[in-house]
Image (cartoon, grey):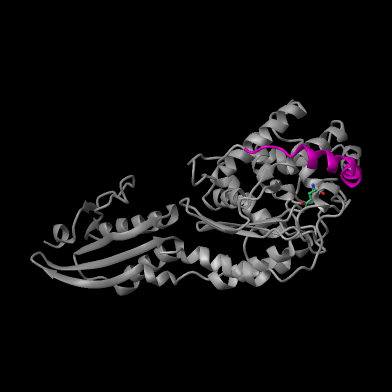
Amino acid sequence: MRSIVTDYLADALFRVEPDTSGQTAQYIPELAGANPESLAAVVATIDGEVYGSGDSDVEFTIQSISKPFVYALALADRGFDAVLDKVGVEPSGEAFNEVSLEHDTGRPLNPMINAGALTVQSLIGSWNSEPEDRGERVRQGLSAFAGRELTIDERVYSSEMETAHRNLAIAHMLRSRDVLTEDPRKVVAGYVRQCAVVVTTRDLAMMAATLANRGVNPLTNEQVVSGEIVRHVLSVMFTCGMYDAAGDWATQVGIPAKSGVGGGLIGALPGQVGIATFSPRLDEHGHSVRGVSLFERFSSDMGLHVMEIPSAASSVVRSNRVHDGERGPTRVLRLQGGIRFAGAERIVRDIEESGIDEARVVFDVALVFSLDAVALRLILEGSRRLIDEGREVYFVDPDGILARADVGDAVIVEELEDAVG
Ligand code: GLN
């Protein structure tokens, strides 16, 4: 059978193809000459399935899409305090290359604009890393996110360096405020090299999927950065990734995203997929015109907006019945799905409100596939209180989902029959 998702992507590309508005990045000569007709879309699931359509293996430079990943590497190398001390996390509402800093502190507002990304570049590695070491750390780090060895396009690097006046201006301004403490020209060179890393749309989708998968690359299974760092980076992408279009993007598309003037655009949907598109003509914000249309389409067609409300918490209680077995009446709560705070609250409320009369209570978790820490605490506390009231409590747990939990005086059994007799 032909893949349904690939066919869907091909159809989406077909629909945006006629739009030839926008221009390739004019301020970097090597990018100005890119083939404006290239067009690709790739979706990578967090378990490593990749669906691509169009020019998904054509190479181009990553440009600003490197920013969230290099930010993640800096957080891993230096820790949150050292990085946040130098770069904020507030949306700027300004263009990516705005020459502006926070008034009082002199910090760049966020790591997605150039001022922030230049500062982040200086924070890679240890405090005394040489620029060459930082370059290699960045290349290797980006490769780990992509799951394959990436290289640098020296022509694009040299081309951008020849016209890097604006980034030099920003870096000198950062140096004058002591946000940068080294030669600003070297920092610009490092940043421009990071932007010249060569990727395909497929690579970008895999990098985004690594974010969506809490920092674990779905192909190599390498934990590239911690889950805590990923949550922070995705939050900054959501609020700042699309610069002065971030609010429109958050409301209409609703996927943490980042664009690059090479024509790439990525979105990472936590726990689901990484998505990437490629089309080099840009709008006034520097975002790929056809990429933005594709993402709008994907978000509505596939219901990908992160603020889409998930199924009701009450759905975690599949049934709440009294079972009449040999050992007399037993209250059986069959639970299901992924249980987080609101689901667990619903379970303990069911217990509190229904004023259980039975001497035995069973929590059947056979159909539960995940219980987060707070849900587990609530349910175990509910169990403890039932036991305090003099009842017996059983958990039906054939797959060992509670294996590491301390269930106190409750009893874990394999099957419902073992509890109700
Ligand atoms: N290297 C580019 C620059 O600094 C990256 C900009 C971008 O992709 N938005 O101008």
Residue 238 in the image, given as x and y percentages of width and height: 66, 59
Numbered-mark total: 0
Name the magenta segment's main secondary structure: helix
Residue 197 in the image, given as x and y percentages of width and height: 70, 41
> Which residue is painted at 57% across and 66% down in the image?
10
20 or 183: nearer the viewer: 20
390 or 83: nearer the viewer: 83
* Residue most extreme to the left: 326
Vertical comparison of 153 with 99: above or below: above
Horizontal arrangement in the rendering, residue 75 relative to residue 342 (left or right): right
Vertical comparison of 168 with 278: above or below: above
> Which residue is painted at 32% across and 68% down in the image?
351
118 or 359: nearer the viewer: 118
Residue 314 in view:
yes
Residue 76 in view:
no
Magenta segment includes 156: yes
> Which residue is painted at 71% across and 27% down in the image?
133
Of the 4 image quadrants, the one containing the C terminus is bottom left
Horizontal arrangement in the rendering, residue 359 relative to residue 300 (left or right): left
Residue 216 in the image, given as x and y percentages of width and height: 51, 44
Horizontal arrangement in the rendering, residue 229 relative to residue 111 (left or right): left
Horizontal arrangement in the rendering, residue 160 relative to residue 56 (left or right): right
* Magenta span of residues: 150-170
Vertical comparison of 179 with 304: above or below: above
Of the 4 image quadrants, the one containing the N terminus is bottom left
Magenta segment includes 180: no
217 or 262: nearer the viewer: 262
Residue 57 in the image, given as x and y percentages of width and height: 61, 50
